[in-house]
Image: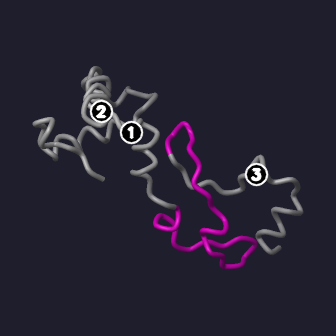
Amino acid sequence: MYFRSNVSGKPKDEIFEKIKLLGRLYDYTMVEDRDAPFEFQSFLDKYDSDRNTHDRIEMLKRPCHELLSDCSCQSQKRNCSDLFVTELTMEGHCCVFNYISQSTSSLSEILYELKF
């Protein structure tokens, strides 16, 4: 990720500290400075206008295969990437299990994909 800290005059460490605010997009109860999220958004609008908040969160997310190491389903060891998908939720990007996408037409299709 590249922020133009030399253009904004803000130290890189300060910018990365403010990025934590992106994890609190709808719940600011843990933020001491209630104006901080809005000030950071103004900063992003000015110095990082080629991306929106969704793009930034997408860039910062950790893929499920980096977060999950050992998975099993019906007592069979499985590749975690076959069982979990990354979905954007109200909490941010989450590794979701047992998610039926709108494009999946039936339960048998899901079981076939999982080879059960």
Point out the tag, 2 or 1, that comes first from the N-terminus: 2
Q: Judge whether residue 79 is colored magenta.
A: yes
Instruction: Answer left or right for 109 relative to 60.
Output: right
Q: Position of residue 3 (x, y in %)?
A: 24, 45
Q: Are marks 2 and 1 in contact (CB under 8 Å)?
A: yes
**Residue segment shown in magenta:** 64-92
Q: Specify few, some or many for label 1: CA neighbours under 10 Å numbering under 14, 14-19, or 20 or more.
A: few
The residue indicated by pointer 1 is 51
Residue at 46 percent of width and 48 percent of height: 58
Between circles 2 and 1, the one closer to the viewer is 1
* Residue type, label 3: Ile
Q: Is 14 left or right of 82, judged from the image as shown?
A: left
Residue 97 placed where, x, y %?
66, 57
Expressed as whole percent of the image width and height from the top left, the position of residue 63 reads: 49, 61
Tell me the distance, in whole angstroms, between the alpha carbons under discs 2 and 1.
8 Å
Q: Identify the image quadrant of the C terminus.
A: bottom right
Can you identify the residue that label 3 sits on? 100
Q: Residue at x 41, y 36 (%)?
A: 52
Observer-side mark, 3 or 1, equals 1
Q: Which residue is mark 2?
A: 44
Q: Which mark is residue 63?
A: none
Crowd class of label 3 (few under 14; some 14 to 19; many from 20; radius 10 Å): few
* Amino acid at the residue labelled 1: Arg
Which residue is at the front of the view, 56 or 110? 56
Residue 16 position (above or below residue 86): above
Helix, strand or loop at label 3? It is loop
Q: Could you tell me which residue is drawn at 39 percent across and 51 percent down?
A: 60
The amino acid type found where label 2 is placed reads: Leu
**3D distance between C-alphas at marks 2 and 3:** 35 Å
Q: How many marks?
A: 3
